[in-house]
Image (cartoon, rainbow, N blue to C red):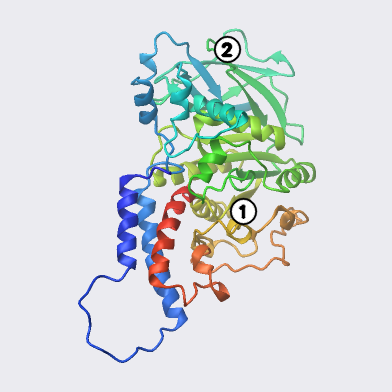
Amino acid sequence: MLALPPSLVAFSLAVLAAASPAPIAAPAPAPTPEPVPAPQVASTIESVFSSATGAVASALPTILGGWPSLSDIEKKIGVNDGNDLSNVSASGLLIPSYANYSGNWNLRFYGLAYKLPNISTSDLDSLIDGLSTNDLNSTQQQLLQNRTQDLASIPIPKANLTALVFANGSSITNSSGIQLQTADDFGEFDQFVTVPGLPDNSSTSVQVVQTGLLNVTGPGNGTVILVPSTGISIVSDIDDVMRITKVYVPNQGLFNSFVQPYVNVPGVPELFAKWAKSLTSAAFHYDTTTPVELTRTYVDYLFSNFPLGSLEMRPINLTEPSQVLDARQNSLLKLFQTFPQRKFVLVGDTSSSTLLSAYPQIAQQFPNNIACIFIRNTSATDSDDKIPYDTSPFKNVKNGTYFFYRTAEDLMNLDIEGGQCVNSSIPQNVTFGEQGGILDSGSNGAASAVFGRTQYAAAVVGAVVAFALSLF
């Protein structure tokens, strides 16, 4: 069963109590009241749910409910930080990144310095609270251990790393490499370095160079895409946009993240392949709030199914929903500032509340750099998604630049460079407020008048738990 934070358990009980009639003395006989009109019932439900979702947003500490924090992992394996593991070699992780051109290429070096301790299989299996490991087949067991092993990486605070750069198999840097800035207290580093000797900016297509780290064990290698100054950049969320995760279903999001082989959302690989071929100087940037330790799992999946690109992972020290939103906004801001002449296509889904806020914000900040915003309406195609989503941030975004789609096919024939972002054959019902989920369970998209208060109480507790997952 999914392990929930005590604050969320208490909150869910409070919602149930608030939504259920309070015990009172038996009243004197009274005339039968007039039935309450449906819109009034819907309004009451929306009011209760709005307060519920607002409270749970501030109560949830971690992604997917049972995702362990760094301190949880350190306690589990009996260490305080990377410096305690003196007999374990240092490892380095370079996350696929990007570079811009200003006379020379400016490469972004982005990653993590860490140590990977020996940890027993049983400890690996138990790292994720609420994830049942009973009755797994051999493939599922192996996937679980591979993914949780990476999650057990312990950062090396203030690490000093040296990087190398290769192009077409030849070293661009000398044998001493590039001394990177000291990593932060969580072993993470993120900086741009000007690297002479790379191909000039005359190519109209994205080029790829290889990077590596000296004096670390493990692969320690990565890729950087050299992005032309002008063209179209596709920025896409991963979970429930590119792969089927179902973060809105308690336990299933965890199971699909750690135990199951990753499965593509139908049609998306074909759509991205078409964009890579047809859009001018197309570049791809993938963004997820999955913690940085699982980078290799995502890289293996992404670049076996989608065009090569850069990747943004969730920083290791983030625990609050507000911090996760800030991370989303910061990664977008860095992209837009790095490529001020490019146009951006932003792709997300309704099950990610952070994107429903971050995309409209960046669109208002850089209106001339937005080509299109595409939001997959997961509740329109998956009856398991019972979570309302808030479209109010789109109220001040230019009409015709955003489109809530159902399937990849809805986007396949749009003329993005010609300014076509909306498929007029797909109905749109953007209310600039909270919509979807159980609020649309009745006719005309509103909650049904016969959806009783006690029934609603039971449903909202389940939806609140699922909403926990959607925050990320």
Point 60% across, 27% down: residue: 107
Residue at image x 63%, y 58%?
Answer: 381
SS state under label 2 = loop
Q: Nearer the viewer, residue 226 or 315?
A: 315
Vertical arrangement, residue 467 with respect to residue 43, above or below:
above
Residue 102 seen = no
Mark 2, residue position: 177
In the depicted view, which residue is nearer to us: 251 or 72?
A: 251
Q: Residue at x 72, y 55 (%)?
A: 411
Q: Residues within 10 Å of mark 2 (few under 14, many from 20)?
A: some
Looking at the rendered structure, the kind of residue marked 1 is Asn
Vertical position of residue 274 compared to residue 308: above or below = below
Nearer the observer: mark 2 or 1; the answer is 2
**Label 2 close to label 1 by CB (< 8 Å):** no
Q: Where is residue 255 in the image (x, y as percent from the top left)?
A: 54, 40
In which quadrant of the rendered image does the N terminus lie?
top left
Instruction: Point out residue 417 in the picture as x, y percentages from the top left corner.
Output: 74, 53
Q: Regarding mark 1 in the picture, which secondary structure is present there?
A: helix
> Image check: 299 left or right of 63?
right
- Type of amino acid at the residue the image marks with label 2: Gly
- Residue, far bottom: 31
Residue 216 coordinates in the image, percent (x, y): 53, 12
Reply above or below: 8 against 125: below
Instruction: Kindly report the distance in space between the C-alpha atoms of the residues bearing marks 2 and 1.
Output: 39 Å
Task: Name the residue at the front extreme.
Answer: 135
Q: Mark 1 points at which residue?
A: 368
- Tell which circle, 2 or 1, labels the residue nearer the N-terminal end: 2
Point out residue 416 in the picture as x, y percentages from the top left corner: 73, 54
